[in-house]
Image (tube, helix red, strand yellow):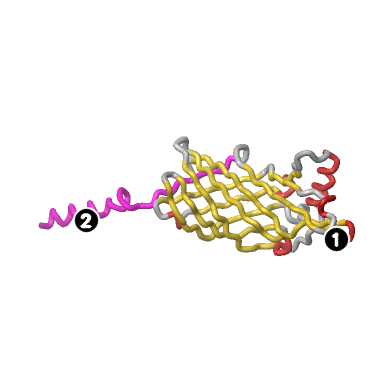
Amino acid sequence: MKKIGALILVFGACLPATFGADARTNYAIDPQKSKIEIQVAREGFLKAFGHDHLVSATQFSGTVQLSQPNVADSAVSFAVDAKSLAVIDPGEAEKDKKEVQATMLGEQVLDVARYPQIEFASSSIKSVSKKGDVLELQVEGTLTLHGVKKTLTLPVQVQLGNDGTLTADAEVSLLQSDYGITPIKVGGGTVRVKDKLKLTFHMVARKTSA
């Protein structure tokens, strides 16, 4: 009986390593394959004479820790070099794009000299659904923008590739005024930038050994 009891104890000790244990996989975001874009719309009486703007982040990094089957133990974080934000308005003159970009990066808007980083760090992750290798997640965390920290919730679709990659797509709106930014207006307000911005993320991350 003692031998049987000892065998049960040994087998039980091995169970967490083989059955039911969470497997955490680490990924590093590949900025060359990923994309972060901001859509800025205009409004006002003479909005037809203004232009919507498309802004893209060109320098950023981040990590993903994916835990399965308990996704709640996962984590994600990324940081954007604020001065790398570039206005890419299709069809606009290069001179106009440079002027818009200078205003965006300057003291009136992002003030990148004082606030060089835009950061996000998750605080909780919930699984909404799973279909095959696609996970629907709700990621809540803190976005630091213009020196202001605010809680942000991202609906994220995650797909795992057989080549060791993880692809995540998300779209969310936020108000500039929530982060202490006053939307730009010209012509006495007849043309102005909307307070609400739309952010879209397409993140491709590769498995790491760490």
Q: Amino acid at mark 2?
A: Leu
The residue to which callout 2 is attached is 9
Q: What residue lies at 85% left-to-right and 55% top-to-bottom?
A: 46
Question: Mark 1 = which residue?
Answer: 189
Quick one: 137 or 189, which is closer to the camera? 189
Could you tell me which secondary element the residue under label 2 belongs to? helix
Q: Residue furthest left?
A: 1
How far apart are labels 2 and 1 at the CA level?
75 Å
Task: Determine whether, in the image, residue 155 is placed left or right of residue 92.
Answer: left
**Residue 57 place in picture, x, y as percent:** 69, 45
Mark number for residue 198?
Answer: none
Secondary element at tag 1: helix
> Depth-wise, is mark 2 or mark 1 nearer the camera?
1
Which corner quadrant of the image does residue 96 belong to? top right
Amino acid at dot 1: Gly
> Which portion, as a residue range, is magenta?
1-30
Q: Quadrant of the N terminus?
A: bottom left
Circle 1 packing at 10 Å, graded few (<14), some (14-19), many (20+), is some
Q: Is 24 part of what is drawn in magenta? A: yes
* Residue shown at 63% from the left, 58% from the top: 143
Residue 28: image x %, image y %? 54, 43
Please check the rendered image and state whether residue 185 is part of the magenta-colored stretch, yes or no: no
